[in-house]
């Protein structure tokens, strides 16, 4: 005798509120570079081994990408380094001195350049979050 069980899950998630704004910036850079190369989404997605829909989500910032994916994107988009995919810091970008940086728990076997790139990525994300917090505090104080 066979018994068939069916489960239905229902969830509503607002993706835009969950994704960090840096992903919109990275996605815009990816889209711009892809268009410069006159490459279709299907072509780039095929090179990356992802669906065209996933690529569209990355380009609009609805889907984040992992560090190892930055390397794949940079190779597929014929860039020298994954850093070329990251948004340029603003002039008022707050950077800590090399000696003041906390040590990140990075995997062993990374080259020095890769460690520096990952560290810079984390600095940019951290700086953006600090600036957003300061903005929220200023708004709450003015109320």
Image (cartoon, helix red, strand yellow):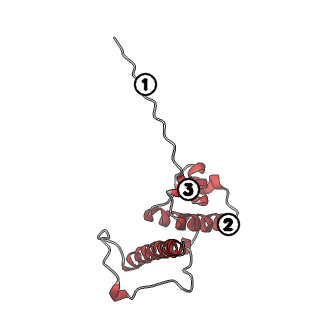
Please, what secondary structure does the residue beneath circle 1 have? loop
State the image coordinates of residue 119 (x, y, percent, origin top left): 40, 76
State the image coordinates of residue 75 (x, y, percent, origin top left): 53, 67
Q: Are marks 3 and 2 in contact (CB under 8 Å)?
A: no
Residue identified by numbered label 3: 16
Using the image, tell me which numbered label, if any, was put on residue 37: 2
Please, what secondary structure does the residue beneath circle 2 have? loop
State the image coordinates of residue 68 (x, y, percent, origin top left): 43, 63
| 4, 18: nearer the viewer | 18
Write the residue at 56% across / 86% down.
91
Please, what secondary structure does the residue beneath circle 3 have? helix
Write the residue at 44% across / 74% down.
126
Viewer-nearest of discs 3 and 1? 3
Cα gap from disc 3 to disc 2, whole angstroms: 28 Å
Residue 54 appears in view? yes
Write the residue at 69% across / 68% down.
36
Image quadrant for the C terminus? bottom right
Residue identified by numbered label 1: 6
């Amino acid at each position: 005798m066979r018994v068939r069980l069916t489960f239905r899950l229902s969830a509503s998630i607002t993706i835009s509120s969950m994704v960090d704004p840096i992903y919109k910036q990275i996605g815009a850079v990816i889209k711009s570079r892809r268009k410069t190369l006159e490459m279709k989404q299907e072509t780039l997605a095929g090179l990356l081994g992802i669906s065209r829909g996933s690529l569209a989500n990355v380009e609009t910032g609805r889907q984040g990408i992992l560090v190892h994916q930055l390397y794949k994107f940079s190779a597929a988009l014929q860039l020298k380094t994954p850093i070329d995919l990251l948004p340029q810091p603003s002039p008022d970008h707050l950077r800590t001195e090399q000696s003041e940086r906390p040590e990140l728990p990075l995997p062993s076997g990374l080259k020095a350049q890769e460690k520096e790139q990952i560290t810079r990525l984390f600095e940019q994300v951290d700086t953006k979050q600090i600036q957003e917090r300061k903005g929220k505090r200023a708004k709450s104080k003015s109320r």
